[in-house]
Amino acid sequence: MEEPGSAAQPPQSDTSSNTSSNDCYFDLPSRFPLSQIIPIGKGAQGAVCSILDERTGQRLAVKKLLQPFRDVTIAKRSYREITLLRLVDHPNIIKLLYAYTPQDTLDTFRDVYLFTELMDGNLRSVIGTKLDHERISFLLYQMLCGIKHLHAAGIIHRDLKPSNIVVCSNCNLKILDFGLARSVDTSFAMTQYVVTRHYRAPEIILNMEYDTKVDIWSIGCIMAELITGNVLFPGTDHVDQWMRIVETLGTPRPEFIARTTPGAQRYINSQPINPGRPFEELFPDEAFQAAASTRFPHLTNEVARDLLRRMLAFDPMERISVDEALQHPYIHVWYYEEDVNRPVPKPYDHSIDAANLSVEQWKALLFKEVQDIQRTMSLDGTNR
């Protein structure tokens, strides 16, 4: 886990536990011993380790934001992620327990650590194992509950994928990584390239206006992957991604094409009409776990295919909504009012998405946010 600049490590002190984990330097309070820090993984935005809190005996996950002030985009994304984590409160969304920086002035501020619950792994570790309908439907139910809560705050996740969803061995699931989330009310264009390619909805690929339905498309792609063990639309670039969707689902209807840009219309109309493939062929009976659920006999292959068909509707106007999906017979078996309709979070500050600030201004906002957390929260996630 290389982090540029990590070679210049500060001296150890008796107030911090320092570790260079695969060249990614962690500088944490002394209650987290060096010998108990275990690397979990590293992405573009951060490196994650498992840590032991000696005071409580519990293990937590800590994410170090990598170079959070590298440029304006990264600085803004870092600030957005921490403000969103503070905003939402749902059992199917990862909980921010604490935020920490070892620096105590804005001038020296450079490191941000986010403490969260520790899960067993991400959903990618589950894909490829044979899952029965009961497990698949329960995983999907939790995704939908978490996303409904996020949408209630006026937020689109935009980057749902197996590596951004963590699970425990008991099938409990939590959504994480809100660095790319955006306000539902955002009125300016948002580039398609921020969304992981294989889970991009058609409207994002075509640079159309989009809404919360893009998250439903991503969940549909994840459901297909849970069933077959393979990425449904493994495009190599955005054009190939589009072609794979068309080859699978067929050429979109004229009503959808008419809402695209003139350039997109010319491109789509220049291509041969493709009828697509039936869902019975895409997801044949042999793709499903043979053992049917004894508790829920109505969770069948055909009911699963119906939900897939509705979540992967080409036109977002025809795609199932999160509320409709929660009422679908493949999902509703798990319906519990306290999961589905948690208290609505405070509205997201939409001005964050439109703000045009410098790196230093975003840095100052993030420093203030981390200081506020350190002042008002304890490391067990409770308010002081």
Image (cartoon, grey):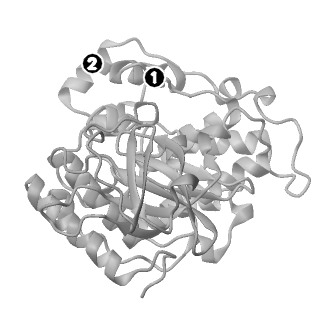
The CA span between labels 2 and 1 is 13 Å
Residue situated in front as seen by the camera: 354 or 40? 40
Q: Is residue 273 above or below residue 177?
A: above
Percent position of residue 365, x then y: 18, 67
Q: 42 and 158: which one is in front?
A: 42
Q: Amino acid at mark 2?
A: Tyr
Name of the residue lying farthest toward the bottom: 384
Image quadrant in which you'd find residue 295: bottom right
The numbered disc on residue 246 is: 1
Q: Earlier in the sequence, mark 2 or mark 1?
A: 1
Numbered disc total: 2
**Residue extending furthest right?**
294
Horizontal and vertical percent position of residue 9: 29, 47
- Tell me if 237 is positioned left or right of 337 in this view: left
Say which quadrant the C terminus sits in.
bottom left
Q: Is residue 158 visible?
A: no
Q: Residue at x 92, y 53 (%)?
A: 294
Residue 267: mark in rendering: 2
Disc 1 packing (10 Å; few <14; some 14–19; many ≥20): many
What is the three-letter code of the residue carrying label 1? Val
Disc 1, SS: helix
Relative to 117, 327 lies left or right: right
**Could you say where residue 284 lies in the image, as x and y percent from the top left?**
75, 27
Horizontal side, residue 123 vs residue 158: left or right: right
Do callouts 2 and 1 mark residues in contact (Cβ within 8 Å)? no
Residue 347's tag is none
Residue 349 seen from this side: yes
Q: Nearer the viewer, residue 33 or 316?
A: 33
| Front one among 42 and 74 | 42
Q: Residue at x 53, y 70 (%)?
A: 90
